[in-house]
Amino acid sequence: MVGQGPVREFIIHSTLLYILLAATISGVGSILGAALLSLTVASRVVERMVSFSVGVLLATALLHSLPEAFESGADPRALFGTLLAGLLGFFLLEKISLLRHSHHHEGDGHHHHHGHDREEAGRSGLTILVGDTFHNFADGIVIAAAFLADPHIGIVTALAIAAHEIPQEVGDFIVLLNAGFSKARAFAFNLLSSLAAILGGIVGYFLLDQLTAWIPYVLVIASSSFVYIAVSDLMPQMQRRPRLKESAVQVVLVAAGIAAIVFITNGVHEQHAHRHSQTGTEAASN
């Protein structure tokens, strides 16, 4: 009995440490993996890879994050309201940026540095970073919940999150490069965004009972940013290249982006189903 207090405290501190390590490896590791792909090969063909990003962002939102949110048991009307608010919110965020800079254009007689318009294209980059930060924060909470349930489940969950984050982060890198970010800035901002997973892990560990109900709404807000960027910014760029050959390449790349997320998402859902079946079996045996 005397030693139970220190042992329990050690277990608690170890669990928090595991959550922090898993969130860091999952978030930062996926950024490094995506950067390795995006900043070497993909950045040479940014225009074409925009199509791949459309597939990744739409599939992540519509086939992974939104289903996870709606399967949580949260009120569907509230989730749809959050989705509507998210889409309108990101529209207003972009609108404010447009209004603030609408009177500045290269060659309009104002004195501003060369490349100003390219920098102003970063509005879509800001939107995707905001959405990705919400998504990473939710991932951190999920990792914390998994480790608090069972360390083995936590490890599997962290690996699954890292796996599905890599293609999504590749898409984010392409969006940022396309929006005028330099390679260094794209990497730095994505790295900062990934730290939200660590914050989510810490907050989730201490306030999980209160935060569990928030996860679906955080996922919906993140999804709204992905859908908004894909539909309002990236797809119109694709429409500017109407030639049949270019259109065929675009369709193939969109399909490739969707396929990457579907393949990984199916694996994640199978792991969730296996985990729930194990939980049910243990409960029945007890």
Image (spheres, rainbow, N blue to C red):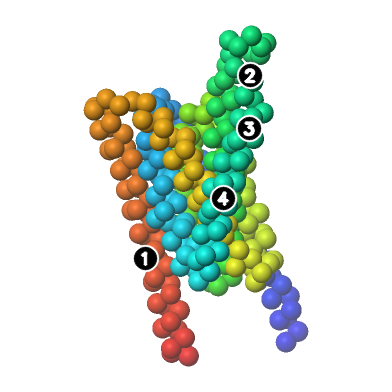
**Residue drawn at (47%, 65%), measured in percent from left and top?**
70
Mark 3 or 1 closer to N-term?
3
**For the residue marked with disc 1, what is the amino acid?**
Glu
**Residue drawn at (37%, 38%), measured in percent from left and top?**
52
Residue under circle 3? 97
Residue under circle 1? 270
**x and y, in percent, of residue 118 in the image:** 55, 21
The reply to whether dot 3 and dot 4 touch (C-beta < 8 Å) is no
The reply to whether dot 2 and dot 3 touch (C-beta < 8 Å) is no
**For the residue marked with disc 4, what is the amino acid?**
Gly
Mark 4 or 2 closer to N-term?
4
Residue 251 sits in which quadrant?
Answer: top left
**x and y, in percent, of residue 199 in the image:** 66, 54
Q: Nearer the viewer, residue 285 or 139?
A: 139
Cα separation, mark 3 vs mark 1, equals: 42 Å
**For the residue marked with disc 2, what is the amino acid?**
His
Classed neighbour count for the residue bearing mark 1: other residues with Cα under 10 Å, few (<14), some (14–19), many (≥20): few
Classed neighbour count for the residue bearing mark 4: other residues with Cα under 10 Å, few (<14), some (14–19), many (≥20): many
Residue under circle 4? 86
Q: Could you tell me which secondary element the residue under label 1 belongs to?
A: helix
Q: Nearer the viewer, residue 36 or 181?
A: 181
